[in-house]
Image (cartoon, grey):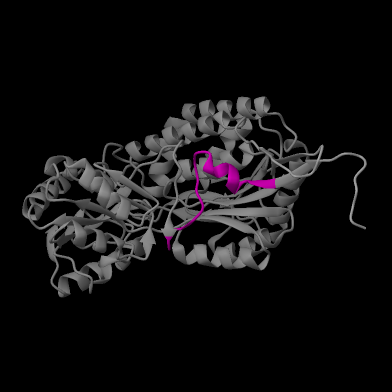
Amino acid sequence: MEAHLLIDNQWVAAESGATFERRHPINDSIVTRAAAGDVTDAIKAIDSAHAAYKTWRRSTPSERRRLLLKAADVLEAKTPQFIEVMAQEVGASALWAGFNVHLAANVFREAASMVTQIQGETIPTDKPDTLSMTVRQPVGVILSIVPWNGTVVLAARAIAYPIMCGNTVLFRGSEISPRTHALVAEALVEAGFPPGVLTYFNNAPAAAAEIVDTMIAHKAVRRINFTGSTRVGKIIAQKAAQHLKRCLLELGGKSPLVILDDADVDEAVKAAVFGSFLFQGQICMSTERLIVDEAIADEFVSKFGARAKALVEGDPSANPQCIIGPMIQESSGTRINDMLQDALDKGAKLVCGGVADGAVMPATILDHVTSDMRIYDEETFGPITVVIRVKDSQEAVAVANDSAYGLSSGVFGRDVNRALAVAMEMEYGSVHVNGATVQNEAQAPYGGTKDSGYGRFDSRAVIDEFTELKWLTIEPFSQQYPF
């Protein structure tokens, strides 16, 4: 497979002709060969986006709605292609790939519905014969940096919402999934968006720092939205701050699912399996901690382990029905094995699964995990989760909040009022009562607290992220001033 740069709606090679390769994490075969843009290409892409902004910012709501709806349809029609490409590039099952495309199409449709919701208001004023109001206006070129894991839906929200508000987008795709991200960009070209409204950029991994520095510093780039690790997010925020540019950051997570003593254990197990092992646990809101009341812990762990052992493993590019595919790279296995061994050395019990062999790891559960173990709060981003036993709901809340992260969470309990009280105490951007931690709807605000970042994607919250609020007055021709 190949992936090029998209500039002025033309798919082009890097000016230098340089390319880089994405290799399969198991057999090391070349999956994708992509154009490796350099600083010259990056500036060319920004200039294209800036030129397009001058006219796109004046496009009508109806025109934006029409094109966003068309993009949703085109994306959905490409579902078979996404399933094939994502299996090869990122080891995604057909379930995860199809789910991504479905959510991405919903994002474009939700964005289309909000084009007429970009509104200001009138403001009471003490000045006679004066109209005081606010208006919201687009800001310019938006730099959108997207990871490989929620490959399609994370790209969709990073593109659709800025465009909805009248901005243009410089979309820097992941070096791990260049062909998948190029497919997203193709959908917008096919939908009929004018040249420059979306530019798509690839670069070789070694050039990332220089390229991103150039993009953030460019005066035409006015805001940055980044989804990825907390470590890199902090770097992005620091670089943006040097240029007084606003960021929207959705970063790492260590999502807890609290199981209270009155929970329906079977239902909680279903949510735990889905949240822990969908896409090998490589989702920012994957369930990485099961905080279980000790009164029901034995029953829960027994049933949870049995369900996890039954999950089909394999290579999704060969078997689209498998649930547990390879992790994104061989080094993921080495990193997780270190955490796994540390936990076992300190008294954790292995319920099922075990040591990773490179990028391949079975669904793994550790019980009796405690706060002195690295895996207690380090993000694993793999098919492994932990059980932490607690005495009561008060301790469950304390353990849930004992984390640097604050992205997604959940709580199970039959007494809904009690479960809601627990949810209200949990320091997370989203809490789902009797639901999995892995959830996303385009009409609901999504983002985190603490080390999981700041700002919100989705819903009307994105209007504030991608517009400027301007105070505007219309005053009488003749006024009296004090001097």
Q: Is residue 224 visible?
A: yes
Residue drawn at point x = 57 percent, y = 32 percent: 114
Residue 432 position in % (x across, y down): 30, 44
Answer with left or right where residue 54 lies relative to residue 441.
right
Q: Does residue 460 show up magenta in the picture?
A: yes
Q: Nearer the viewer, residue 438 or 10?
A: 438
Residue drawn at point x = 54 percent, y = 67 percent: 235
Residue drawn at point x = 26 percent, y = 67 percent: 375
Q: Residue 120 is drawn in which quadrant?
A: top right
Q: Is residue 272 visible?
A: no
Q: Is residue 57 above or below residue 361?
A: above
Q: Residue 360 is drawn in which quadrant?
A: bottom left
The quarter of the picture where the C terminus appears is bottom right
Answer with left or right where residue 10 lies relative to residue 318.
right
Residue drawn at point x = 21 percent, y = 53 percent: 362
Residue 266 position in % (x across, y down): 13, 41
Q: Nearer the viewer, residue 90 or 481?
A: 481
> How many callouts does the rendering have?
0
Query: Magenta region: which residues?
Result: 450-469
Answer with left or right where residue 276 lies relative to residue 243.
left
Q: Residue 39 is drawn in which quadrant?
A: bottom right
Residue 180 position in % (x across, y down): 49, 43
Residue 94 position in % (x across, y down): 34, 37
Q: Nearer the viewer, residue 280 or 175?
A: 280
Q: Nearer the viewer, residue 22 or 306?
A: 306
Q: Does residue 10 show up magenta in the picture?
A: no
Q: Is residue 255 above or below residue 160?
A: below
